[in-house]
Image: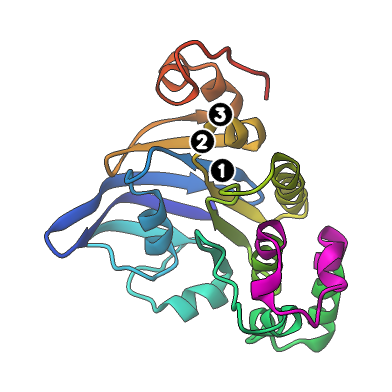
Amino acid sequence: MLLEVNSIQVCYGRMVAVSDVSLSVPEGGFVAMLGANGAGKSTTLRAISGLVAISQGAIRFAGASVVGLPAHTIARLGIAHVPEGRGVLSGLTVQENLHAGAMGNPDPKHITGLRDQVFGYFPALQSRLGQLAGLLSGGEQQMLAIARALLKSPRLLMIDEMSLGLAPQVVDQLMQVLVELTRQGVAVLCVEQNTRLALKYASHGYVLETGRSTIEGPGAALLSDDRIVKAYLGRAAKPIQA
């Protein structure tokens, strides 16, 4: 198993944001983390990437504990985190944002290959290299955020609320890229409020409720799980095929 999160707890002062979350992501797997606002999804990603400390539990990546490691060290181990809101450097150009993503990768030839790959996924970025990132559309900014993360050669790509504020056709394009990445061996952990969308593509899903992981299973099975249908898809919703 590439990533293993076991019974972690995260506190912000006296507030317990995550009380008991466990999940795992296999090599090349596509895993969705679902739940309402405030369920602890984003905090869980931040704990995995070392941006917040856990007060109990364990996080292992490629068989080794990453608890207590600084965020930059965890990133170099192969975990790339695209945060909610995309996190692009709006005052820098697309080219400069991509250069920032490639920092720390010592192999120029490998970087060239990765750039060619991300331009294959997102050809719109190649024609906007000199444009300020802050002037891109929301969909293009999300493409840039993912492309920048991919230039770090991650083994695990974590992406938070990718579909937020984007047109359905753009979201579908981005999801297809994530699926292709898993075919190339990159594991994906996707936090998504659009439950139907996430479970359509994910091979496995976890549901968080008030800081705890409560339901898990294959994506197709969760789409037809009555608890998921009633709580997240609407009581009148009909389960759809993955």
Q: Is residue 129 magenta?
A: yes
Horizontal and vertical percent position of residue 58: 32, 57
On the image, numbered disc 3 is attached to which residue?
218
SS of the residue under disc 2: strand
Write the start and end of the magenta stretch as one range. Answer: 118-142
Residue 27, x across and y down, in percent: 62, 51
Whether residue 15 sits left or right of residue 168 in the image: it is left
Above or below, 5 relative to 51? above
Mark 1 element type? strand
Q: Is residue 88 above or below residue 16?
A: below
Q: Residue at x 60, y 59 (%)?
A: 157
Q: Amino acid at mark 3?
A: Pro
Residue at 67% across, 65% down:
141
For residue 205, which numbered disc appears in the image? 2
Foreground residue, 212 or 140?
Answer: 140
| Residues marked 3 and 1 touching at CB (< 8 Å) | no
Q: Is residue 152 visible?
A: no
The disc, 3 or 2, on the residue closer to the chain's N-terminal end is: 2
Determine the secondary structure under disc 3. Answer: strand
